[in-house]
Image (spheres, rainbow, N blue to C red):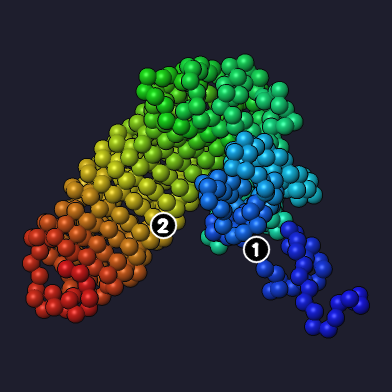
Amino acid sequence: MPCWVGPRSRIVVISKDRELLRSCGIESDRLYEVDYPSEELASQMFCRCAFGQDSPPDGFMELAIDAVELTGNLPLGLNVLGSSLAGLKKEEWEERMPRLINRMAGQIDKTLKDSYDRLKEEDKALFRHIACLFNHKTCDYVKRLLEDSKLDVDVGLVTLAERCLIQISEDGIIRMHDFLQKMGTELVRQPCIQEPGEREFLLDSQEICDVLVDGTGSKSVLGIFLNLSEIKDTLSISEEAFSGMKNLRFLRIYGILQKDKSIISQLSGGEDHMWRQLRLLKCWGSSVRCMHLPEGKNHMWRQLRLLEWWGCSMRRMPSNFRAENLVELRMPDSQLQKLWEGVEVLKSLKTMDLRRSKNLKVFPDLSEATNLEELYLEDCCSLVMIPSSIRNLKKLRKLDMKRCTKLRGLPVNIDLESLHSLNLSGCSQLKSFPQISRNISYLFLDETKIEEVPERIEDISGLSYVSMKGCKNLKRISPNISKLEVIFFSDSYSLHVDELFRQQCAHEGYEW
């Protein structure tokens, strides 16, 4: 120990690398992770550098607030920008701010890139994926979409977190600072500034249009993220536009269009290799009237992991739809009337979301979707029935069919052993109490035509919460329901209940 370290000295070691600290013998319980400063503290830090005091002087308040916001509360940015503005007059602040921001960004990038450069190639690739695609997503989400890639996602996420390149919240949300995210997108852009079709990810709407129109996309392209609201002119896309993108895995199309625009005139037929490696399709914008998925060879779907298309204008899925690797199917607000004929092998499917698909009349056979965990059919107001094939959904945890106003009932004599929550509120044609699971915990049956809560309710051993508000046809309730923890029966006008049972409910604290 050097002689200048005296007895009882406290040594503080600062590093952006947890692994380095552990290798120096510093135990985990002695590590403290410093989060980004609060708005108030960030303002104080900036003002100390810019003004030598904790708050801005008269006339500088709005400028100081804007400057702090531009730094994203990053301490390095607060220091660099504040020091650069120190001693300047208000007019000089306004004149020099844009140039100083660019200089600040350059200094920050240089510092942050040093941490990136020390990563292994696999971890660098994961960093770029997060910067371009997965920021603010859950760890589980990232693992699902990259599980068959060459990236070790579990180890990579830990490494990035330990190098302070990402933060992972207690509930598993990945958070990458804005400056780091911008650096990541620049790392993708810089090697191919003049040739965007050679990049991993295409993020700029105009550059994407150029690549698609000119057909310059290459096998380097892994993902395209097109914001339709940024496109001013009509864009005509044919299947040849994707002919060179043989490794395309992620396609996200989003943004609300003006109704008089026809942005995408064709995306169908012909060659199907653009779909062979496709793992993410995201589309937002109900005004995309003429975008359709191609009818080609079956294997074009087989690598697809996530299909997300808000406001889809198709009335049915392509006849060749085969997606045994699909994990999430999300198509809210679609024009779908049916999905497919027969039985699809969807062994990997975990989430299906068709909310507000008001034209959906026929629900598909899900006999082979044995790993499905969540099914969302809220406001599918044309749906009349659910097939008995749902008996095979042994892992289904949540079923939401709220406001399916034409639904008359659910299949009987089935037992979904994993079902935790069932929502049938607003199913105004529903007359029978559902018999779907003995393990359900939460049951929502508000504003239905159910007339009776049967005695068999005591067989639902895990049931703790029942809501039947506004069930105006309800006439009889089994006394066995008093064993539940929470019950709501307000505005059930036709209800005639034994006074003793009413008093018992009041004594137990249930709402009547």
Q: Residue at 29% across / 36% down in the picture? A: 358
Instruction: Report the amino acid beneath label 2.
Output: Arg
Q: Residue at 39% across / 39% down in the picture? A: 332
Task: Give x and y (percent) for residue 456.
Answer: 23, 67
Of tags 1 and 2, the one toward the viewer is 1
Pointer 1 local density, CA inside 10 Å: few below 14, some 14–19, many at least 20: few
Q: Is the residue 279 above or below the residue 84 in the image?
A: above
Mark number for residue 5? Answer: none
Instruction: Report the amino acid beneath label 1.
Output: Val
Task: Give x and y (percent) for residue 64.
Answer: 56, 48
Whole-angstrom CA distance, mark 1 to mark 2, is: 38 Å
Q: SS for tag 1?
A: loop
Nearer to the camera, 181 or 197: 181
Q: Quadrant of residue 201?
A: top right
Q: Is the residue 294 above or below the residue 420 in the image?
A: above
Nearer to the camera, 113 or 457: 113
Q: SS for tag 2?
A: loop
Mark number for residue 34? Answer: 1
The tally of labels here is 2
Pointer 2 local density, CA inside 10 Å: few below 14, some 14–19, many at least 20: some
Q: Which residue is mark 2?
A: 397
Q: Quadrant of the N terminus?
A: bottom right
- Residue 278 seen: no
Q: Quadrant of residue 186?
A: top right
Q: On the rendered structure, is 92 left or right of 312?
A: right
Task: Give x and y (percent) for residue 292.
Answer: 45, 24
Nearer to the camera, 338 or 309: 309
Q: On the rendered structure, is 187 left or right of 372?
A: right
